Amino acid sequence: MKWLSIILMAFLLNAESYDAKVIRVADGDTITVQDSKNKQIRIRLEGIDCPEIGQPFGNTARQFTASYCMGKTVKIEKIGQDQYGRTLAIVWAGDVNVNKALLKAGLAWHYRGNKNRSLANLEREARNTRKGLWRDKNPMAPWDWRRANR
């Protein structure tokens, strides 16, 4: 229990939250923001993986994210950093958690490395109701699509 408390404290001390303006939506799960110091930061939405551009529903996912974020000020809840130097974050457009909204709309997979059960449940709900990409008989996960298209 003591170790859990130490890990939680370390996480909370590293957590960072700030407002920033979205200046680019690369795809459904990657945006670029400009912070209050005019620094541009690439953000990867934590816990999800959207279809790639060129993949079925890739453009739909990008348009969905843009409709919530493009040109708007959003709240970034920094979780960490990925191997490509992008900030991993939860993105809030007003009171909408964009990460969860993409899953709920059936436009993303829950990233299996993320243990957040609510994200897994949102993906399962979208699958069961055949929303978005789950209308396809055999939707290809973006990690499989990237591997096949290298």
Image (cartoon, helix red, strand yellow):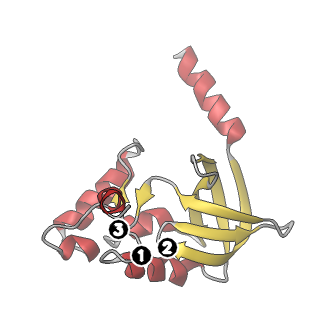
Numbered circle sitting on residue 105 = none
The image position of residue 14, as x and y in percent, is 70, 39
Secondary element at tag 2: strand
Task: Answer with left or right where residue 91 lies relative to residue 143.
Answer: right
Q: Nearer the viewer, residue 22 or 82?
A: 82
Q: Is residue 123 left or right of residue 45?
A: left
Of the image marks 2 and 3, the number of the one nearer the N terminus: 2
Residue 27 disc label:
2
In whole angstroms, how far apart are the C-alphas of marks 2 and 1? 7 Å
Q: Marks 2 and 1: CB-CB under 8 Å?
A: yes
Q: Name the outermost residue toward the top.
A: 2
Q: Name the residue: 51% across, 54% down.
A: 46
Point out the tag, 2 or 1, that comes first from the N-terminus. 2
User: Is 125 on the left-hand or right-hand side of 40?
Assistant: left
Amino acid type assigned to the residue bearing label 1 in the image: Ile
**Quarter of the rendering containing residue 41:** bottom right
Q: Residues within 10 Å of mark 3 (few under 14, many from 20)?
A: many
Horizontal arrangement in the rendering, residue 143 relative to residue 81 (left or right): left
Task: Give the residue at mark 1.
Answer: 53
Marks 2, 3: nearer the viewer: 2
Q: Nearer the viewer, residue 33 or 56?
A: 56
**Amino acid at pointer 2:** Asp
Instruction: Residue at 66%, 65% (x, y): give it.
Output: 75
